C-alpha cells in the first residue's frame, strides 16, 4: 500500500488545492479512502485531517469503507421509489446476505441506495459497476444472480 500512496502523492506538489484530485486518485486506486492514508494526505498537503474528512464526506464519490468488486447502486429517487425500489433493494440484500452499506465477506459485492441515477423512465433501476439494469422486478434478482458453491455470482449477461 505504501508504494501506491507514494506514487500517487509524488504526482502532486502538495498544495492545498491538490486535495480533491489526490482523494480521487486514492479512491480510484484503493476503491475507498483508508484512514491511514488520509493521515499521510494530511501531512503531505498540510490540511488538517478533520478538514479532509469534511471534504470527502461532502462528495458522494468518496467512500470511507471498501466496496465490493461488484458494486450495486439501487436508485431510490421518486420514480424508482414509486415503482418499488425499496423492495428491490431489500430483495438484493436478502439474496446477497448483506445490508446496505456493507460488503460480502469475500469482497465480491456491496450495495448502496442512491438518490437518483437519472434513469427515471426505466424505473425501478440499479447499476452494477457502471451497467444500468432497468425495470427490475423481484424475480429479476434471481435471474441476475446465481449461486455457485453457496456464493452468489453475477450471470454472464451482467458482465
Image: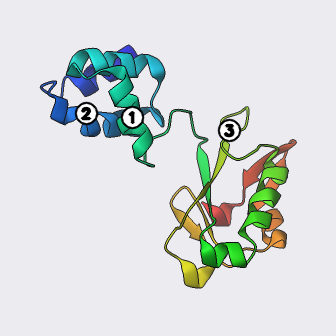
Q: Which mark is residue 103?
A: 3
The crowding category of the residue bearing disc 1, from other C-alpha atoms within 10 Å (few below 14, some 14 to 19, many at least 20), is few
78 w.r.t. 128: above or below: below
Lateral position of residue 71 relative to residue 42, left or right: right
- 1 or 3: mark nearer the eye: 1
Query: For this rendering, which residue is in front, 57 or 148?
Result: 57
Q: Residues within 10 Å of mark 2 (few under 14, many from 20)?
A: many
Of pointers 1 and 2, the one earlier in the residue sequence? 2
Estimate how packed mark 3 is, as few (under 14), some (14 to 19) or many (20 or more) residues with alpha carbons within 10 Å.
many
User: Is there a contact, CB below 8 Å, between mark 3 and mark 2?
Assistant: no
Residue with the most extreme right position: 150
For image coordinates 63% across by 66% down, the residue present is 76
Residue 99, compared with residue 15, is above or below; it is below
Residue at x 64%, y 63% (from the top left corner): 158
Q: How is the image coloured?
A: rainbow
Q: Position of residue 45 (x, y in %)?
A: 21, 22
Where residue 145 sits: x, y (%)? 77, 58
Q: Secondary structure at mark 3?
A: loop
Left or right of 88? Residue 128 is: left
Residue 54: numbered disc: 1
Name the quadrant of the N terminus: top left
Q: Earlier in the sequence, mark 3 or mark 2?
A: 2
Q: CA distance from mark 3 to mark 2?
A: 27 Å
Mark pair 1, 2: CA separation = 12 Å
Query: Which quadrant of the figure has residue 80?
Result: bottom right
Residue contact at pointers 1 and 3, CB within 8 angstroms: no
The numbered dot on residue 19 is 2
Placement of the C terminus among the 4 image quadrants = bottom right
Amino acid at each position: 500500500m505504501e508504494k501506491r500512496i507514494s506514487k500517487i502523492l509524488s504526482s502532486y506538489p502538495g498544495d492545498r488545492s491538490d486535495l480533491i484530485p489526490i482523494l480521487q486518485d486514492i479512491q480510484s486506486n484503493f476503491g475507498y479512502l483508508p484512514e491511514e492514508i488520509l493521515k499521510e494526505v494530511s501531512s503531505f498537503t498540510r490540511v488538517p485531517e478533520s478538514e479532509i474528512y469534511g471534504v470527502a464526506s461532502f462528495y458522494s464519490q468518496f467512500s470511507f469503507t471498501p466496496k465490493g468488486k461488484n458494486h450495486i447502486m439501487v436508485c431510490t429517487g421518486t420514480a424508482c421509489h414509486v415503482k418499488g425500489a425499496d423492495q428491490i433493494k431489500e430483495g438484493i440484500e436478502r439474496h446477497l446476505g448483506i445490508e446496505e452499506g456493507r460488503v460480502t465477506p469475500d469482497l465480491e459485492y456491496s450495495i448502496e441506495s442512491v438518490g437518483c441515477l437519472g434513469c427515471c423512465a426505466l424505473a425501478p433501476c440499479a447499476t452494477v459497476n457502471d451497467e444500468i439494469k432497468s425495470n427490475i422486478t423481484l424475480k429479476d434478482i434471481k435471474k441476475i444472480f446465481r449461486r455457485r458453491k453457496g456464493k452468489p455470482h453475477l450471470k454472464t449477461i451482467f458482465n
